[in-house]
Amino acid sequence: MESVTTRVTLTPRRLTRRRARHKRTGRVVVVRNHRPAPSRSCESPACRRAAAPGMALAFPAMTLRRLVVLACAAVALAAALPARAGPAGTVTGTIRLTGPAPARPPLPVFKHKEVCGDGVPDDRLVVGPGGGLRFVVVTIEGVRGGNQPERDATVLLDNRACRFDPHVQVAEVGQWLDIRNSDPILHNADARLGKETLFNVALPPGRQVRKPLATPGTIAITCDVRHTWMSAFVVVAAHPYHTVTDAYGAYEIDRVPPGTYTLRVWHEELGILEREVTVPSSGIAVTDVAFPARTEPKDDGR
Ligand SMILES: [Cu+2]
């Protein structure tokens, strides 16, 4: 068979097809290196260098540009993050109620039964497995030189199924409280810090309002639309060393600078307990706390 030589320029995919075809016919194909034509938008010096013949580049010009943008974004993000200076430990443990768990029947509903039903769970004293207490606020007091509060963050208090959700939460000074009504009925949020009324807002269905959290303390919130069973607490801390216990009564506070501090435990009905805790430079300090049993629901006069 006569051999024929042809000079062509092919893309890799077309080259593969052509080679397969001429392998059968015996025709020889001489292929020059294929180089994509420079983009018309390639006008910067860096881009022209990338497209110049003979240059061996690891990334196309557009990828380089994206890498530069990503690097700048990473530098800006690192500058925005709070400093994590020095060693830090973790404080963990369980908050329990001693003795048998008291019976807490659902709170009776007097209004809007078509939405709320005949009763709602009593979140004011929730005892889990092993006596673990839910909705206990745990804070570490006396940390000097630690992280500052994370300002401008937002926490949410929802009105859902005729309850405030969550029943207890912690925020930090300088943050915002969003209050939303996800129910198809009117609610209200009457917020008090001690004897001072912070705000009192009506919440028609679907409405959401935002309030500043400017002062440390425990904010008690109720619904004045004759929903006497509704209550919530927002504890505003002046530092980031806080948490709320889960359904097992467990808690964990991490990134605490080493030192000896006061572990403060607050429950809306059981009161306040304090323990000394020594945080190591790394690792975990375990501190369990137990409240004495109390069987009678709190009489809040409502
Ligand atoms: Cu309500």
Image: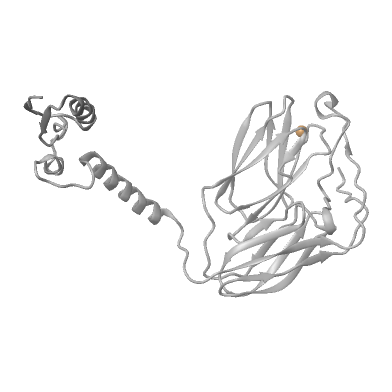
Q: Where is residue 133 in the image (x, y as percent from the top left)?
A: 80, 56
Colour setting: one colour
Q: x, y percentage for residue 244?
A: 70, 55
Residue at point 32% right, 46% down? 70
Residue at (41% x, 53% y) in the render? 80
Counting the numbered discs, the total is 0
x, y percentage for residue 4? 7, 26
Give the quarter the ligand 1 occupies: top right
Please state the horizontal and vertical placement of residue 117, each as a whole percent of the image. Answer: 85, 29
In the image, 191: left or right of 103? left
Q: Nearer the viewer, residue 175 or 193?
A: 175
Report whether 66 appears left or right of 37. right
Q: Residue drawn 61% across and 54% down?
A: 215
* Whether residue 190 is situated above or below residue 251 in the rendered picture: above
Residue at the front extreme? Answer: 1
Quadrant hosting residue 27: top left
Q: Residue at x 91, y 58 (%)?
A: 294
Quadrant of the frame with the C terminus? top right
Looking at the image, is 127 positioned above or below residue 7? below
Q: Quadrant of the N terminus?
A: top left
